Image (cartoon, helix red, strand yellow):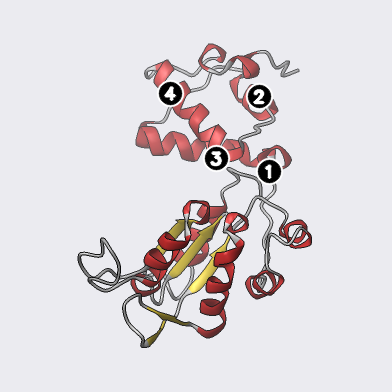
Amino acid sequence: GETGTGKELLSQAIHAASLRAKYLFTPINMDSLTAQLFDAEFFGHTKGAFTGAEKDRAGYLETTNRGTLFLDEIGNLPRELQGKLLRVLQDGEYIKIGTSTPRRTDIRFIAATNKNLESLMTQKKFRKDLYYRLKGGWLHLPPLRERKEDIPALIGSFVEEYCGSDGVEFEPGVMSLLEAYHYPGNIRELKALIQAALNLAQGRPIAPRHLPGPIQKINSN
């Protein structure tokens, strides 16, 4: 799904509805991992395993055992690291840095991407074996512009999050403006927009003037 469509929230919901719910849900931004960070963050290390390793550290594969590891933007993981991830997925085993004994882990992996992985495979930027290993189940989150019937419920959820049970009123026509907008930033943009409008309204009903310029200009008729 596109950026901001709620892929992490869906993954959290899958975790919460599963038998793993009492264990950790750990989100990881794969785009931020270098080779050294990948090994240290995933596998963990012992004291003195490398320069700067001043104490033992448990990696994600240890701390999230029996839980869910959410691999966000898997398409951005450098190809040289994809093989390391594949081995864990296939065997359920890893070796902590500074040791030589394999350890086992029992984790549900959920991966998300805003890219076309099949296209990346054609460009040899994503391993085919990792792609087919990850593709045990496939869920597509459509952009918000294709599911505008969700907008009122999402707005209600955001208002409750920010205002509690007190809620807030909307002037006539405001909801129509919000439903007509195309939201290039998807749900993330809608949430930020509602937060900004609440801050501007200061407890008063939300009016068109509290919305961004592009939305104010929409002809809701």
Question: Crowding at label 1, few (<14), some or many (≥20) Cα neighbours within 10 Å?
Answer: many
Q: Which badge, 1 or 4, comes first in the chain's sequence? A: 1
At mark 4, the secondary structure is helix
Q: Which badge, 2 or 3, comes first in the chain's sequence? A: 3
Residue 142 visible: yes
Q: Which badge, 4 or 2, comes first in the chain's sequence? A: 2
Give the CA separation, mark 1 to mark 4: 24 Å
Q: Residue at x 36, y 36 (%)?
A: 164
At mark 3, the secondary structure is helix
Q: Please, what is the three-letter code of the amino acid marked with disc 3?
A: Leu
Q: Nearer the viewer, residue 164 or 94?
A: 94
Q: Nearer the viewer, mark 4 or mark 2?
A: 4
Q: Residue 183 falls in which quadrant of the image? A: top right
Q: Tell me: residue 56, above or below residue 141.
A: below
Q: Please, what is the three-letter code of the amino acid marked with disc 2?
A: Ser
Give the CA separation, mark 1 to mark 3: 14 Å
Q: Residue at x 52, y 61 (%)?
A: 71
Q: Residue at x 22, y 71 (%)?
A: 47
Residue under label 1: 143
Q: Which badge, 1 or 3, comes first in the chain's sequence? A: 1
Q: Tell me: residue 82, above or below residue 1.
A: below
Query: Which mark is drawn over residue 176?
Result: 2
Residues marked 4 and 2 touching at CB (< 8 Å): no
At mark 1, the secondary structure is loop
Query: Which mark is drawn over residue 198?
Result: 4
Q: Is residue 123 left or right of residue 50?
A: right
Residue under label 3: 154
At mark 2, the secondary structure is helix
